Image (spheres, helix red, strand yellow):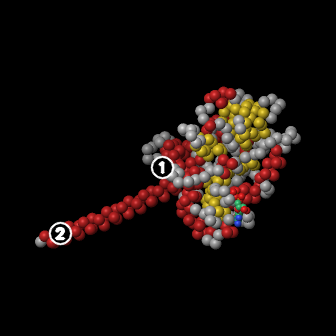
Amino acid sequence: MQLADLGWSPFFESYFEEYRIKDFSALRIVRVNRGNFIATNGVGDFSCEVTGKFSFKSEGKGSFPTVGDWVVASEVPNEPKAMIHTVLPRKSAFSRKVAGQISDEQVIAANIDTVFIVTGLDQNFSLRRIERYLSVAWESKAVPVVLLNKSDLCQDAEAKKREVESIAFGVDVFMLSARQQSGMGVLKDYIKTGKTVAFIGSSGVGKSTIINALLGTNRLEVNEVSELGSRGRHTTTFRELIVFPAGGMVIDTPGMREIQVWGDETGLEQAFDDIEELSKSCRFKDCAHENEPGCAVQEAIKNGSLDPKRFESYLKLKREFAYLADRQTMKASAIEKARWKDISKYAKKLKKDKL
Ligand code: GDP
Ligand code: ZN
């Protein structure tokens, strides 16, 4: 396997340039243990530690390597070991705030292209919850796709799908049954060589069942096989980043499974802060980010730091909000008009009474 099969792209290449000449190598983290990291280059695995300088310089937990990260490392000669010098910038990241610590975040997983939001079409179904998962997904910069699983248990699946589509602007929504293995074919469009996916959603919605169906075997068995390292030695590498038999990767960690959503999540509008921020650097103040010269958004799409699908959804969401806002003002002005009608009626009546 080559680095590209593991998701290496011009985005990371551009940041790696300065290290290449110094004989460093690029590795992808497949598992994080306490203070120790397992990384791969597609040929072999390395047990890694961060350098003393790295620990000293890093400001918080958020800057430490996590599953899915690309790191700059130096290999220890003749040993499956490497030292991590730095973490390359992340294309996307799921993180959580560390309790009790101000402004420290722990990154759960990085460089995920597509995140499947799984929900059951049974009692688990909740539009509000899907909305919150969407917000978490957009904030991570991974592109969300909604999977309505357990279609075998639902009579009005089509209607539920339409409901989801009405709140998930610009997001693909699919119905499937992991148990019956029906509707699973669409996942191939996202799970491709070099692409990384992840699954989030409440416990019991069918994430493991889907992953196992895609792997064609049990996830535990897959990991047991890869535990026998290339040198025939038994290592204890239980991978949290796994390569699918037909190409593509899945990140499945306890942290990702623990992502939960509750009230007062940041709104969808704020989930696109990065694009709002980019817009400020466009040459024209009223840039529509289409083909204007000096457009920072189009530039970001070109250099791979902004996913075009993410931008598309942002535009759709913006249009939707503009429409809603318009409806609000229309409603407000209708009320205003009615009020004026009442007032003028009243005034006329007063006048008449006086006469
Ligand atoms: P996870 O917690 O999200 O990983 O969920 P699991 O994959 O462990 O599934 C929870 C339960 O739902 C198991 O008993 C599965 O057999 C069942 N399940 C998963 N997918 C389907 C489905 O498509 N239809 C039905 N009826 N049950 C399913
Ligand atoms: Zn622009």
Q: Where is residue 262 in the image (x, y as percent from the top left)?
A: 56, 54
**Residue beneath the point at 74% across and 66% down:** 180
**Residue beneath the point at 79% across and 48% down:** 223
Amino acid at dot 2:
Leu
* Pointer 2 residue: 350
**Helix, strand or loop status at disc 2:** helix
| Location of residue 172 by image quarter | bottom right
* Pointer 1 residue: 288
**Residue beneath the point at 64% across and 53% down:** 200
The yes-or-no answer for disc 1 within 8 Å of ligand 2 is yes
In the rendered structure, the answer to whether residue 66 lies left or right of residue 328 reads right
Amino acid at dot 1:
Ala
- Quadrant into which the N terminus falls: top right
Is the residue 196 above or below the residue 13 in the image?
below
In the rendered structure, the answer to whether residue 208 lies left or right of residue 261 reads right
In the rendered structure, the answer to whether residue 182 lies left or right of residue 282 reads right
The answer to whether any part of residue 167 appears in the image is yes
The answer to whether any part of residue 178 appears in the image is no
